[in-house]
Structures are given as structure tokens and as C-alpha cells.
Amino acid sequence: MIALRSELPLKGDASGRFVVWLVMVLVFMASIAVTTNAYIGALLGHWGQSVTGTLTIQIPVMLDAKDPTSTAATEKVLDVLHRHPAVESAAAVPREKVTELLKPWFGPGEAVADLPLPVLIDVRMSTSEPSAISAVSNSVQTAAPGAVIDDHRAWLNRVIGLAEGLGAIALTMMALVTGALALTIVFATRASLAEFAQVIDVLHVVGAKDGYIAGQFARRAALQSLAGGLAGLVIYAPTLGIIAWLASRIEDGILPDVRFPASLWVTLAVLPVAAGAIATITANVTVRRALSAKV
Amino acid sequence: MALVRKKADFVGDTVQLEAVGLRYADGPEIFSDVSFAIPQSSFHFLTGPSGAGKTSLLSLMYLAKRPSRGKLMLFGDDVTDAKRNRLPAIRRRLGVVFQDFRLLEHMTAFDNVALPLRIAKVSEAVVERNVSELLKWVGLEEQMQARPSVLSGGQQQRIAIARAVVHRPKLILADEPTGNVDDAIAVRLMQLVVELHKLGSSVIIATHNEHLVARFPFPRLHLNGGKVTALPPMHASEIGTAAS
Ligand SMILES: Nc1ncnc2c1ncn2[C@@H]1O[C@H](COP(=O)(O)OP(=O)(O)O)[C@@H](O)[C@H]1O
Ligand SMILES: [Mg+2]
């Protein structure tokens, strides 16, 4: 009880309410950043899993569209693939499916059916070792010199690049939010120090230590930040719900269904506590520095 | 003179100044080469006209300012350049009455008086007992739960004095403690401080009220023109003469 006694009338001052509101906004923004980061992580995991260890082999159409070499080459390549120890499975994509994929560009009807189309072979590797992939590539190239082998790495690298960029933005946002919180606490604390200079002088005269006075400011800042942080989460919850709902209305395939990891919920729950901790430390340091300039 | 005494001789002194000077910012020295010693359990008036530097001199002793030069010792401890973290322990042996009281407006009379005890982490049971007793003694039994702002000047002054003495300080420093009250109350407050002095505290009271000084047989430190002179107790016939 003694430990919680406060000689400084810090409760209802204006800078205090300002801190609560600001921390609410900051934690709201931090929640968005944290969620964005988690979503990007989950997307990357999803995409990475679905394309690593796979190859797409394209057997091009020879100059004469009806040339049976294409089929012969396909058979040859499939044979090589099936016997290769690093290959788990390999199958030509049925012509109907390729036609289906092209329909949006050529329109329905017989036009597509008559087109000379390359043969696509989906390969699932039993390993994603680069050495195994190049071994398979070499074998395929030997069997069918014109075959084009795509291990999706270029595509994946671009996706990873984009995701990393977005992740960096989220992290920058977190850093800015943390800085803004610390600055807010510094200025609010300085304002209170000025407001209560007389009371602080009296506390010093009766023998109060700097740490005791700093502790009262720190406790106040911690409680305000915790309250603001919880409020931030409370307003974030429906926001997240709305975003999830909007995302669910987007057609399958563009945004894969990914599950947020449990660590996201933990991180979100920790945000108000982190805000409280940052506020405590900042207020404490601010007060001690200001007081150390006194006699 | 006093400076040539061996250090061991000073151990018993509550306050000791050696060639102390004080200036504000870049201004001239308010006082220079001030040297005196206040022995244990003594009682002194600090006299001098307004603006002579009484408040400034007291604030050196309650460690709100540092001397611009010279040496200041409290309770045998050199505090001239003492590290800041050493000061609270020394301040807890002091009791200070400010000219403007400096009561904390958001607290009751009781909590104001309890402040030095609570800062020193005295148990709440002891706080309760000592503060109630002291407030009864100064005649504020009925006002314990009142905020200072609703009390009269005299009542506030008694709270200020009670706060300064509740922790039985070794040295009581009072700045014009009778400045805002009429003579009858002033004398009663003085008697209160004299009681504490009899219990063993050293007392220094800054005042420019000659009538008050002449009423009590205590020696004076007279501050004028930047110099301190030790004077014997004031006689009523001296009132209005140059020495005061
Ligand atoms: N904070 C301050 N800054 C500058 N000058 C001051 C300050 N406080 C007091 N003084 C000056 O110091 C001198 C002594 O003031 P003070 O100690 O209050 O005297 P007294 O208490 O004897 O009236 C006065 O000339 C006053 O103007
Ligand atoms: Mg004065």
C-alpha cells in the first residue's frame, strides 16, 4: 500500500489523457504492422511449399505442328524422369487442361483446339537440392534438346523480394511507432515535471530519492500506456475481422487461404505490455536525467 | 580564527561554513567569506534586512543550493561537492519551514505532516500515532483531514512546522516562520520550536521581526552587506538600531 502511495497528483492531468489516446493509436498501428508481417510470412510459407520441389518442363512444338516428334520427345522425357531417383512423380498436363488455361486469351470454340500447343510436364521432386534439380535438368536436356525447364525459382525470388519489402515496411512502421511512443512519454513526462516542480522540490527537501520520484512517473506512464494499448487492441479486433471478411470475398487462387500462426495472437497480446514497458523505462530515464541536473 | 582548529574539533558541530560565497548565475556574490559554526543543540536567529540573503543562506543549509565557493559541512560531513545520491540521507536529518509553507495542496493536513515519515518508509502504524499526536499538540486535531487551502494562514503555518519536525530532525531551519501571523500566534509558534530545541534539535530561525528576536534570549547571526556577524541575544532597547 505504501509502495503505491503517490505524492504527485499525476492522475487527472491533461498530458496523461493525451498519452492514453496516443498509445491507443500507436498500438492499433503496431497491430496492423504485426498482422501484415505475419500474413506475409504465412503467404511465403504457403507459396514456397507449393512450388519448391517442383519443376515444369515444356516440350516446345516443332516447326511442323503435326510432327510426332513432340509426342516422341515427351515420351522420352517422361521415361527419363520416371527412372530418375530424385523424381517422385512426373506427368504430362492433359491437353484439355492446357486448352482450358488458354481459353481466356483465345476465346471459346475450336480455335484453341487446333492450335499447336507445347506439352507441359509437371514434375514433383523427392528433394529440392539444387544439385538434384540440375541433374534432372541435364538428363532432360539430353533426352530432348529443345525442352525448357522451369524450377520456379525466378518467380519465387520475385515473390520473396516483394514480401521482404512489405515486411521491411512493417518493421519500419514498428520502429516509428516505438519511437513515437518514447517521444510522447518524454514530452508528457517533461510537461508533468514542469507542472509539479514545486511538489518535487518539497519531496526532495524531505529526503525523497530521485528513484522514488521517477518511480511515480514511471508507474503512471506504465498504467496509461497499458490502458491505451488495451484500448488499441479492442478497436483493432473488429478491424481485423473486417479485413478478414473482405479477403474471404476475393476469389480463390489469388489469395490462398493461409492460417495465422499462434505467435501472431501472442504478439498482439504482448503489444500493450510492451508499450507499458517502453513507457516505464522512458519515463524513468527522463525523470532521472532531469533531476540529475538539480543540486 | 576558527579555521585553524583541528578537524576533530568540528565533529560536534551541526553546521559549519568556511569562507562560503554564493552567487546567482553570473551575478555578484550575495555574500562572501561567510564562516560560522552551529554547535549541536543550539538555537540561533538569522537576522538581517530583507534582501540580505537569509533565505539564500538557509537554502545552502537545506541543500537546495550549493556554495559557489568555500566549504559547507553538515553533521560533520563535507557536503560542498557531495554526490547527489548522498543528499537524501542528509536531508532526512533536517526539518525545513518555508516562508511560503509549500504545503502540498492535493493532500490533507495529516498527509502533509506524514510526508517525511512516509518518504523514510516508517511503518504506517508509527506514522498514524506520531502525526496524530503532533497535530493535537499544535492544536489541529479537528483539521487533520482538511486540505491546506481551506485553513487559515496560522493553521497552515502550524502544519508547515509540524511537517518540519515530525521526524525529529537534528537541525530545524525555519524561514520567517512567523512572517504571516500576528504577534500572539508568532509567540506560540516560537514556543513550539523552543520545546523542540529543548528536546535536542539545533534550530536556526531566519527573521527580520525584531520584536520577536528581542523576546527570546538566543544568539544571532546577523547578515548584512554580504557579511555575517555573530551577535549576542538582542535586548529590547536595541530595537530599531543599526545592528539589527
Ligand atoms: N533565484 C534567484 N535568482 C537571482 N537572484 C536571487 C534569487 N533569489 C534571491 N536572489 C537575490 O539574492 C538576494 C538575497 O535574497 P534572499 O536570500 O531572498 O534574501 P532575504 O531572505 O534575506 O530577504 C536578493 O538580492 C535577491 O534579489
Ligand atoms: Mg527571505
Image (cartoon, coloured by chain):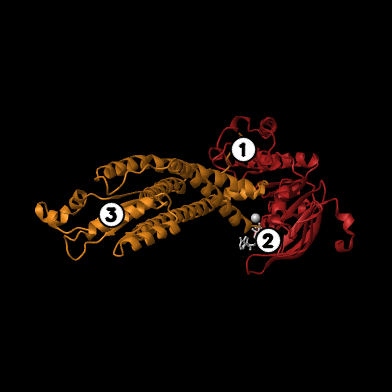
Chain colours: A orange, B red
Q: Quadrant of ligand 2?
A: bottom right
- Per the rendering, the mark at residue B52 is 2
Does the residue tagged 3 have its C-beta within 8 Å of any atom of ligand 1? no
Nearest to N terminus: mark 3 or mark 1:
1
Q: What amino acid is labelled 2 in the image? A: Ala
Horizontally, residue B93 falls left or right of residue A132, namely right
Disc 1 marks which residue? A3
x, y percent for residue A140: 34, 59
Tell me which amino acid carries mark 3: Glu
Q: Quadrant of the N terminus of chain B?
A: bottom right
**Label 2 vs label 3, nearer the camera:** 3
Residue B102: x and y, percent?
Answer: 60, 47
Q: Is mark 2 within 8 Å of ligand 1?
A: yes
Q: Residue at x 58, y 56 (%)?
A: A290
Q: CA distance from mark 1 to mark 2?
A: 42 Å
Q: Secondary structure at mark 2?
A: loop
Of marks 3 and 1, the one in the foreground: 3
The numbered dot on residue A75 is 3
Quadrant of the rendering where the C terminus of chain B is positioned = bottom right
Mark 2 vs mark 3, CA separation in Å: 112 Å
